[in-house]
Image (spheres, rainbow, N blue to C red):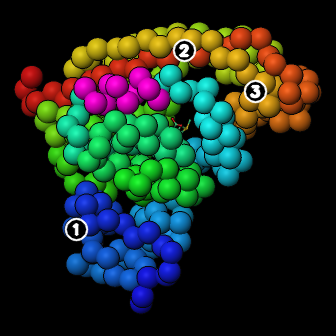
Amino acid sequence: MPSRPGRRLPSDRLLTVLTCPLCRSGLQRTGGALRCAARHTFDIARHGYVSLLTGGRRPPSADSAAMIASRAAFLRAGHYAPLARTLAALAADLAPPSATVLDAGTGTGHHLAAVLDALPGALGVGLDSSAPALRAAARAHPRAEAAGWDVWRPWPVRSGCADLVLNVFAPRNAEEFHRILRPDGALLVVTPTDRHLRELRGSLGLLEVDPAKEQRLRRTLAGGFRHERAERLEYAMDLTAGDVVSLVAMSPAAHHLNPEDVRRRVAGPGTPVPRVTASFTASVYRPRRAGR
Ligand SMILES: C[S@@+](CC[C@H](N)C(=O)[O-])C[C@H]1O[C@@H](n2cnc3c(N)ncnc32)[C@H](O)[C@@H]1O
Ligand SMILES: [Zn+2]
């Protein structure tokens, strides 16, 4: 079957990274799909990402189209630009310019794109289980590609192929992070601190961030990873009421808060909201070798 016009095919380099999720062998392009030697076949979506999730087992945690649209709007407004700059600087320090970068729960691919800008020959592969996220991630950067996957399941990714794994406010799979990283690779995890959005949490009913989150993360990763360093990033954001509505609509609170209620609580869309704290920890981990 000829590929559809305008479709961006997965690159040859991506095919050196991905494996068949059913039998673990390599994948080849055939027209509008990828196929392994055992003829397991996976669609290349019109929007350019590869759908490796089969059997309708999409995890319930996947972001909806409305959540992704809100996330895209909020990120486009630049409120997390200091975080993108921090990630770019860390990536340039941790990985070679031609790195293979895997981004677990990539969302719109915004942070992956910032990292790719800092690594001029790198390939970025964003994994996500949300189709609207994958559509955005596949066009986030000329060297970003995207694959539909549930990061809690074993990844359709070759062992030891990644120089850098990114995990920004997204689900983690410590075993798979370890398996796919090269022994000298790095894992970069970003979590919000308990001060993140603190001015808004009470008034909008946002979920609290557990103050022990960072410690819990270190414990979860401790079996396979050594904590190397952490950078704390904190700054004030000047948000409009519209930004606050996007912020709520892109967060897990979107499942239990009504955007109309939020809009009423923060008044008109152009109304500035008092300065709101953004507060993150970016942590660098290194894979432990067996027996160390
Ligand atoms: C809070 S967003 C963060 C997105 C992105 N990393 C960023 O910094 O903007 C979490 C993302 O993880 C994805 N996600 C949630 N559960 C997942 C799973 N089990 N497998 C893959 N992706 C998942 C969601 O669809 C969403 O895009
Ligand atoms: Zn197969």
Determine which residue is flagged by label 2.
Answer: 279
Magenta stretch, main secondary structure, is: helix
Tell whether 103 sits left or right of 17. right
Q: Position of residue 148 (x, y in %)?
A: 46, 58
Which numbered marker is on residue 26?
1
Q: Nearer the viewer, residue 120 or 205?
A: 120
Question: Per the image, is 111 magenta?
Answer: no
Q: Position of residue 169 (x, y in %)?
A: 50, 31
Tell whether 203 sits left or right of 286. right
Q: Residues within 10 Å of mark 3 (few under 14, many from 20)?
A: many
Question: Per the image, is 85 magenta?
Answer: yes
Q: In terms of secondary structure, where does tag 1 sit?
A: loop
Residue type at numbered disc 1: Gly
Q: In terms of secondary structure, where does tag 3 sit?
A: helix
Please name the residue shown 7% across and 26% down the image.
Answer: 291
Residue type at numbered disc 3: Val
Cα separation, mark 1 vs mark 3, equals 45 Å
User: Taking 91 as reference, is 11 above or below it?
Assistant: below
Determine which residue is flagged by label 3.
Answer: 244
Mark closer to the observer (1, 3): 3
Mark closer to the observer (2, 1): 2
Span of residues in magenta? 84-93
